[in-house]
Amino acid sequence: MSSIALVDCNNFFVSCERVFDPSLIGRPVVVLSSNDGCIIARSNEAKALGIPMGAPLFEWADLMERHKVHVCSSNFPLYGDLSHRVMRILTHFNPDIEIYSVDEAFLAMDGVADPQVIRDKVLQWTGIPVSIGVAPTKTLAKVATKKAKKRPNGVFTPTLDELSTILETLPVSDIWGIGRRLTRFLAKKGIFTAAQLRDQEDIWLKKNLSITGLRTAWELRGQPSLPFDEEPPAKQSIMTSRSFGRPLLAHEELAEALSAFATRGAEKLREEERLANWLQIFVITKEEGSAYAFTTLPEPTSYTPTLISYAKQALQTLYKPGLTYKKAGILLGDLVPETCYQRGLFMQNRDTAQERKAMDLLDHANEKFGYDILHFAAVGVTHGWKRKSELKSPSYTTNWNDLLTIRI
Amino acid sequence: MALKIPFYPEGVAAGFPSAADDHLEQSLDLHELMVKHPEATFYVRVEGDSMEGAGMQTGDILVVDRSLQAHPNSIIVALLNGEFTVKRLTVKGKQHFLTAEHPAYPPIEISEEADFQIWGVVTYVIHRAR
């Protein structure tokens, strides 16, 4: 029987900050998003105070001041570097790891090592604590890892019986791959627990949840059904793609297809109440295989016209006349909750004319009163919090000028 | 995903190999000398004179390897009461000390209950001469 481990760094961004500032250990700590707008990581102590993931900073500033919560701006050079180190250490145990996100990786475990040994090595070598769950499938490993986080030794290799028991009470929303929309749908059908989903008839699953839902159920039953990819899809991203019924040749046709994908992707974003920070398009031609174009977005958005516009611009850089286009798609990535940013201003319910009017007002007001006025309104009363990464820790591992200095 | 293909801007010579090729060795690489466990190696700067006897001066960079076991007499980066320090780990019978390399600094005993942790082992001291 196969055995897969999910190695998941605990409160990763916070843990990175703690490696070089151990005074943060045991204290409530939060890390802010790139524009210091919302909270993207919390230590366990901060979670215990009730601070939710994705919380806008200004809403929680008071509480955080009262409880002396330490606030860090995000330090992605540091997090990226420590993440690479953790992943490379995992390859010492098995070169075939699947890096799922900046702080998670799947590892095939058959005879490879004791998860405790892996955990101890990562902790000693990098200072990053990880939790490791081991189970027959990736989906079950995710379940096991979540339990491992609560255990003092940070690892959990449940027996099949223990897994079964857990699935009896595990809500479907906690299953990997089951999002808000599916949770609501399943609830309507009277399916609330992982065990109930697992036990549904295959025919029903395929019909109502498509092949993805069927695979999830198989995974819950202990049958590995999700391939161990070399290049896994990015976590926190939405992909919309299609193979074309007949290959496309003209630029306009391709632009139309990508606009449709962008529209659908934007809809999915809004269904999940999230915004994308970047966009990547890909095309596959018969003659030259696949090509990609990546672009960051000026600000996190789910606004369809913006996504269409950027998708089309990206296409300009890729399109070559004379090739036959078989497939194309759009990947929307680095997703953040809508609550991070001004709500309502860019919601799709407004029509474009009204949207343009709103944006014009914003521009004029900023021009007249200066940038700060309306920006200030979005971020809220600052309580001395500075904006724009002023609370960023040094890039200890990527910049010679930022090395940790020790008084000896 | 973009496929990376190495590109040799000067072109690759074809034809008879040189006799020197048989004895070709890599140029000396400082990183290869000093960093045996890249994933566990970090650099820190020091300020102060307590470790002068070990060749450390203010502004020097230490190469610190977290993967190594600290032995008696290893120079270590440690956390004592939550503060970073760099000292030599010495053992006298059952007692452990953080010992400086400067006459003005007495050894600090590490008691059983002390808030003490080894952060990493110092392998090299880099001093800039110019």
Image (cartoon, coloured by chain):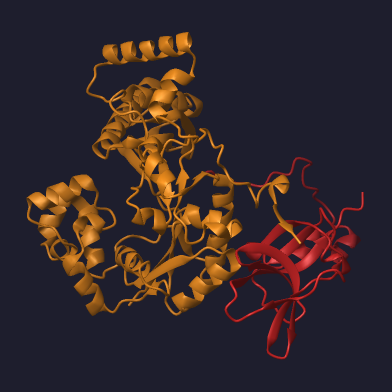
Chain colours: A orange, B red
On screen, A383 above or below A169? above
- Foreground residue among A271 and A317: A271
Viewer can see residue A312: no
| Residue B8 lies in quadrant | top right
Question: Percent position (x, y) of residue A17?
Answer: 55, 53
On screen, A72 above or below A201? above
Horizontal side, residue B90 vs residue A228: left or right = right
On screen, B7 above or below A347? below
Looking at the image, the residue that sits furthest to the right is B130
For the C terminus of chain A, give its image quadrant. Answer: bottom right
Question: Percent position (x, y) of residue A269?
Answer: 30, 36
Question: Percent position (x, y) of residue A39?
Answer: 41, 43
On screen, A7 above or below B99? above
Looking at the image, the residue that sits furthest to the bottom is B93
Horizontal side, residue A171 vs residue A357: left or right = left
| Residue at 20 percent of width and 57 percent of height | A172
- Foreground residue among A313 and A353: A353
| Residue B95 lies in quadrant | bottom right
| Residue A279 lies in quadrant | top left
- Foreground residue among A182 and A408: A408
Q: Could you tell me how many numbered marks the image carries?
A: 0
| Residue at 42 percent of width and 9 percent of height | A364
Question: Percent position (x, y) of residue B21?
Answer: 86, 61
For the N terminus of chain A, give its image quadrant. Answer: bottom left
Viewer can see residue A115: yes
| Residue at 68 percent of width and 89 percent of height | B94
- Foreground residue among B7 and A348: A348
